[in-house]
Amino acid sequence: MPKISKINCFAMIAVTMTLSGCARFPVGVSPSSQQLEPGKLDAGSAIRSMAKQPSPWPLQEWWKIYGDPQLDRLVTEATADNPTMHIAQARIKISQALSGAAKAALFPYIQADASFTRELFTEQEFIPPPYAGNWAWYNLATVDLVYDLDLWGKNRSALAEALDYVQMTTAEAQEVRLALDTAIVRAYVQLSLQFVLLDVAQETLHQRQEIFNIIQKRMSAGLATEIDLRQAETVVPAARAEIERISESIELMRNLLSALAGKGPGYGEQIHRPTLSLNLPIQLPSAIPADLLGRRPDVVAQRWRVEAASKGIEVAKAAFYPNINLTAFVGWESLGFAKFLSPESMISGFGPAISLPIFEGGRLRSQLRVSTAEYDIAVESYNNTLIRALEKVANQIVTMRSLEKQRTETYQANSLAGRAYDIALYGFRSGLTDYLNVLNAQNQTLLEAQRKAQVDARFLDAYAALMQAIGGGVPVTSPANQGGSR
């Protein structure tokens, strides 16, 4: 290898940088989107009104407020066994491995190469006899060292981008867990509702059977007609059919909970009737728009996506500059094996390796445009996620406030319907009213009982949806940690 002086090396680098500086570095290729500032978004009257009476942020295991140990067990087992959680965790491992590969580019790497080639050598080159014009072995073995100087920060930006993706996938895994927790709670609420509806249906069947028995006795005494008997008899099978329909829904909800827990349908057969309760005022932490940035996993994930995309732009820009590596090698080279590993066959060398894009048909400019467009997409996705997050929080606050009022009115309606049915049934037994009045009162009782159960279930469900909207709760901080944080 010819010797290269330090002056010549620096001259080559200077010329290369000059050529790059005079090259086609793009002007006017830049992102067009800007991130929304949460504090400047109008959160709306629903969220602002909650900020006047702020409460602590809910705990990470927010579902425990329902007071049902079986629900706690379901959530815990689903977190450990659900395949979607395993997929999310595997994505974190992939991003961590990719960041490790990006980090490796910052350090020198050493590799060994060896080749042993049987070759017919020409007589027209500087090949010594007896190899010229004959077959012989050409042997080469070297240890190479290459170090990328990374003068323009391409590798550092690539590493920063990869680390941002690690943060993004971690936030996405938290989003998957929150969605899974919420799905289990909401399915469990629906299971609870079906059990309450089953109680209503069974009570309705009991009432209709009781009325049918009364009409039978009255008919035997000549106080009722065949039409009265058949009308009372017709609604009894309908009540049994309703019980069967609700029983089917209970089994389907058990199967759904089994799947969410990462188990087979047999797991759901062990799920008993829920014992949910939720009696608390609607309260939220203050400064919801700003808090969503750090609490809601999908917003956090989108923010890290924006950070990663910005690093991708830096990587694309660095590609316009020359790539300068320092290389060195040492090894053996010989014709034949006789003196292959002898000192006379040793070779070595070092020097810079420079590559400069001069004419590449606009490829680098197009890559930069792709990177800036990806950044714009990431920013607008973040903006959209933030806006939708505020919308969902506001929606759930409105829903829960409305349900609080609906519960009051529905409870009253249910109580009045029950009293009306008792009066109608008493009058029917006394012969003061006909069967139609009893049937109407009974149907109204059934309707109001169903409404009451549905409003209660919607309130329980709305709280779970609100927890998902605000991004779940926060881990419990020990007193020692709290003291350290000060």
Image (cartoon, rainbow, N blue to C red):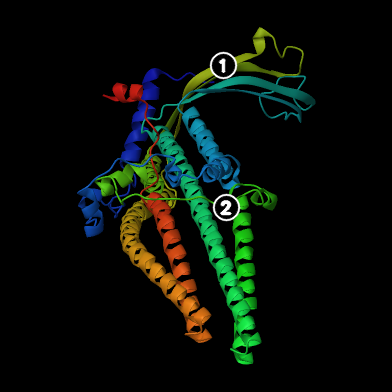
The first of marks 1 and 2 along the sequence is 2
> Neighbour class for label 1 at 10 Å: few (<14), some, many (≥20)?
few
Residue 342 seen anywhere in this rendered image of the structure:
yes
How far from the left and from the top, in percent, is residue 267? 66, 48
Q: Residue at x 31, y 52 (%)?
A: 29
Q: Image point 76% across, 29% down: which residue?
A: 119
Name the amino acid, label 2: Arg
Image quarter hosting the N terminus: top right
- Tell whether label 2 touches label 1 (CB within 8 Å): no
Looking at the image, residue 222 lies above or below residue 6 = below
Report helix, strand or loop for mark 2: loop
Quarter of the picture holding the C terminus: top left
Could you tell me if residue 362 is visible in this image?
no
Instruction: Give residue 348's mark.
Output: 1
| Numbered circle sitting on residue 273 | 2
Q: Nearer the viewer, mark 1 or mark 2?
A: 2
**Cα–Cα span, label 1 and label 2:** 79 Å
Image position, residue 287 (x, y; %): 24, 46
Indicate the amino acid at tag 1: Ser
